[in-house]
Amino acid sequence: MSDAPPLLERDGVRLTLDAAGTVARVALCNPAKRNAQSPALWRALAEAGRLLPGTVRVVVLTGEGVSFSAGLDRQAFTPDGFDGEPSFLDLARGPRPELDRTIAGYQEAFTWWRRTDLVTVAAVQGHAIGAGFQLALACDLRVCADDAQFAMRETSLGLVPDLTGTKPLTELVGYGRALEICVTGRFVHAEEAVRIGLANLVVPAAELAAAVDDLVAALLAPPRSAVNETKALLRSALVHDEPAQYAAERAAQGRRLQDLAGLGE
């Protein structure tokens, strides 16, 4: 890692770059509260995405301490909420369009991880609950310590997962499994997470950082343009019909061949 100061360090989020500027690391850095999330943290995460230099190819998301993220800070549901913030109860009493705009703003912290010019990796240890689970789902890949535990507790609290997690969860594990995980709120442990396609790899907790570093090195090995085109193709495969996807493959390969032949724009 570079000795340069963080590009961002506030509200429980730290953004740093490696010396080459190709790998960014976003750390949830409030271990005393098990990296519980708040609107201020979500704004910081969204800002981290905006601050990434164009040289960055891989982003690694970590949580400091024993837990990746224990989910939403329950203070949001108290009458006082957070200092300088409306409580969720006050938001619920306000105009519905304002509530919708506010939640859309929160979701910005969870959407930039899917950009096709990046590959994003969540390194998950301990608890990833609710908003923490959805933040791990925002990333392209998940590497888990053997003590990792995922749970979607929103439904148990009379709520729904609203931080963009329902689509990737369903894509990864299928509708029936996603419904069961969300409605029961049960824990999905690391070994099951790998078995059902929720996680890519599980390793002993002491080896998590090294395993992530190995994966990052492998992700950086191919040419960036080919990686970006491949990610875009795989994402479009989720929504395209077959003819549209075949056409997208042809167009992407045409661009790659032209680039290799020195004919790219």
Image: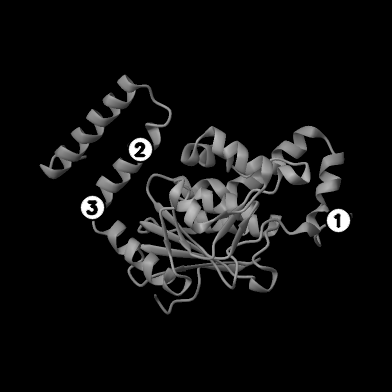
Residue occupying the far left of the picture:
261
Which residue is under mark 3? Answer: 223
Q: Earlier in the sequence, mark 3 or mark 2?
A: 3
Disc 2 versus disc 1: distance between alpha carbons?
Answer: 42 Å
Disc 1 versus disc 3: distance between alpha carbons?
Answer: 50 Å
Q: Amino acid at mark 2?
A: Leu
Q: Amino acid at mark 3?
A: Pro
Q: Residues within 10 Å of mark 1 (few under 14, many from 20)?
A: few
Q: Position of residue 221 (x, y in %)?
A: 24, 58
Identify the residue shown where x is 33% and y is 22%.
242
Q: Position of residue 262 (x, y in %)?
A: 12, 44
Secondary structure of residue under mark 1: loop
Which residue is under mark 1? Answer: 78
Identify the residue shown where x is 48% and y is 48%.
198
Q: Nearer the viewer, residue 142 or 187?
A: 187
Q: Nearer the viewer, residue 74 or 222?
A: 74
Q: Earlier in the sequence, mark 1 or mark 3?
A: 1
Residue occupying the far right of the picture:
79
